[in-house]
Amino acid sequence: MNRVDLHTHTTASDGTFSPAELIAEAQRVRLDVLAICDHDSTEGIAPALTANSTGALEVIPGVEVNTDVPGGEVHVLGYFKQAPQGAMQALLARLREGRYQRAHGMADKLAALGMPIAFERVVEIAGGGSIGRPHVARAIVEAGHAATVGEAFERFIGRHGPAYVERLKLSPAEAARAIRDSGGVPVLAHPFTFDLNGTLLKSVHPEQLVPELVKAGLGGIETYYYRYPGDAIVSLLRLAEKFGLIATGGSDFHGSIKPGQGLGSVFVPWDAVERLQKALDSEG
């Protein structure tokens, strides 16, 4: 029985569960430890802690920062003892503003393509949370320009789509340093992407990226993740051991927009929690 999920999202970014609903679901599936890692936002943490008033569940404050490398994206998770303040919040606010402007630019491009969506509807779908492409995709589907969110990405707002807009640029090393400077532990998120057949679809080439990020304060690699086959896990465990990094993991739970990735559906060893807690204690 899995007791740990160190990668989840709420309506503070692109999840479909409110923080309180996420806490209730974590209790339902009998998790002991839950980390909330919304994209470029920690706004879901306080309401989650309120909903967890009994303290039966250990809630670890986190964030997922989307960064860029040539030709792709790298996501960096940050874990904290308390929600970060000061410079980290200023950075997250700047990234959220960039997301808002990016979504607006996508709406403008869609209109120019003859596929208009109401930007106000994108904001409404986001519900006050950090706006992401999934919110734009849902608006595209509602407007009848695509049948599914996946199709909306493929036809319009994927990296090579005609309505794609670049994000505010931040490097993985910059994100890692910002997390570490705010008392957190930065972790390289989901280095690989696999399809249902176990075929590797995408890699951030962790063997090349990790040495650079270690210099910037990297503390872990997300090793246990959705659809990861055994050989991928073993390769990441070896890389983590080589650099003295924590092998973390989680479901990347988003609710109904990623129905296959149920909360707690990825087994994460308890050792990951103990090592993460020790690292956070040393930062504090």
Image: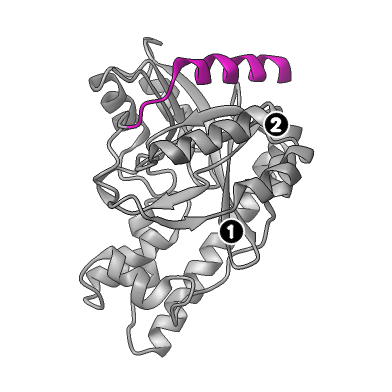
Q: How packed is label 1: few (under 14 Cα within 10 Å), some, or many (20 or more)?
A: some
Q: Residue furthest right?
A: 215
Write the residue at 55% across / 67% down: 101
**Mark 2 or mark 1: which comes first in sequence?**
1
Amino acid type assigned to the residue bearing label 1 in the image: Glu
x then y, percent, for residue 155: 34, 77
Q: Are marks 2 and 1 in contact (CB under 8 Å)?
A: no
Residue 243: give its label. 2
Q: CA distance from mark 2 to mark 1?
A: 35 Å
x then y, percent, for residue 104: 48, 72
Q: Is residue 82 left or right of residue 200?
A: right
Of residues 255 and 219, the one drawn nearer to the viewer in this rendering: 219
Q: Is residue 279 magenta?
A: yes
Q: Nearer the viewer, mark 2 or mark 1?
A: 2
Write the residue at 29% across / 48% down: 258
Question: In terms of image quadrants, where is residue 15?
Answer: top left
Q: Residue furthest front?
A: 231
Quadrant the C terminus occupies: top right
x then y, percent, for residue 178: 72, 41
* Viewer can see residue 153: yes
Of residues 59 and 69, the one drawn nearer to the viewer in this rendering: 69
Q: Is residue 106 left or right of residue 24?
A: right
Q: Which residue is mark 1?
A: 97
Amino acid type assigned to the residue bearing label 2 in the image: Phe
Magenta region, residue range: 266-284
**Up/down of 41 relative to 185, above or below:** below
Q: Is residue 148 magenta?
A: no
